[in-house]
Amino acid sequence: MHSTLFALLLVAALAWLWRDSLRARELAARVSRRACDAEQVQFLDDTVALVSLRPVLERGRPALRRIYQFEFSRRGNDRASGSVMVTGHRLDTVFLSPPPIEAPARTPGTVVPIERTRGQDH
């Protein structure tokens, strides 16, 4: 009797966790897509990936904090990453990695040849 009740409670808890995780993932995907639209970048693969799941206290109540990662493209030929933090069913933060710092373009003719004189080691 007790083992049957325990099994039913375990199955119910797993079903709740699965449903709760689907809702949080849908929120993260929707928020990621909107953030990419707002930044005028392309949301890649139309998905988010769970990278962290941990219990926390939110306003004195237990909740699950999830961090999802996603990828986006600025130019169409690159990939950058972003993340979304969701606690319970509330959005905490959205982060899109900043664009890379571009090295200054080299102009032709700026290379200075180094001449070596025989017999000198520098």
Image (cartoon, rainbow, N blue to C red):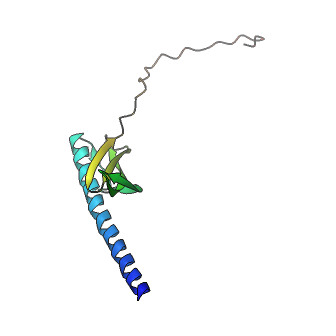
Image quadrant where one finds the N terminus: bottom left
Residue 59 location (% of width, % of height): 29, 50
Image quadrant where one finds the C terminus: top right
**The residue positioned farthest toward the right in the image shown:** 119
Residue 90 location (% of width, % of height): 25, 52
Residue 17 against residue 25 in the figure, above or below:
below
44 or 4, nearer to the observer: 4
Residue 15 location (% of width, % of height): 33, 73
Q: Residue at x 21, y 41 (%)?
A: 38
103 or 64, nearer to the observer: 64
Q: Is residue 59 visible?
A: yes
Q: Residue at x 33, y 49 (%)?
A: 85
32 or 13, nearer to the observer: 13
**Quadrant of residue 97 within the rendered picture:** top left
Residue 78 against residue 25 in the figure, above or below:
above
24 or 46, nearer to the observer: 24
Residue 102 against residue 84 in the figure, above or below:
above
As drawn, is 117 to the left or to the right of 26? right
Residue 54 against residue 2 in the figure, above or below:
above
* Count of numbered labels shown in the rendering: 0
**Quadrant of residue 5 within the rendered picture:** bottom left
Residue 29 location (% of width, % of height): 27, 55
Q: Is residue 66 visible?
A: no
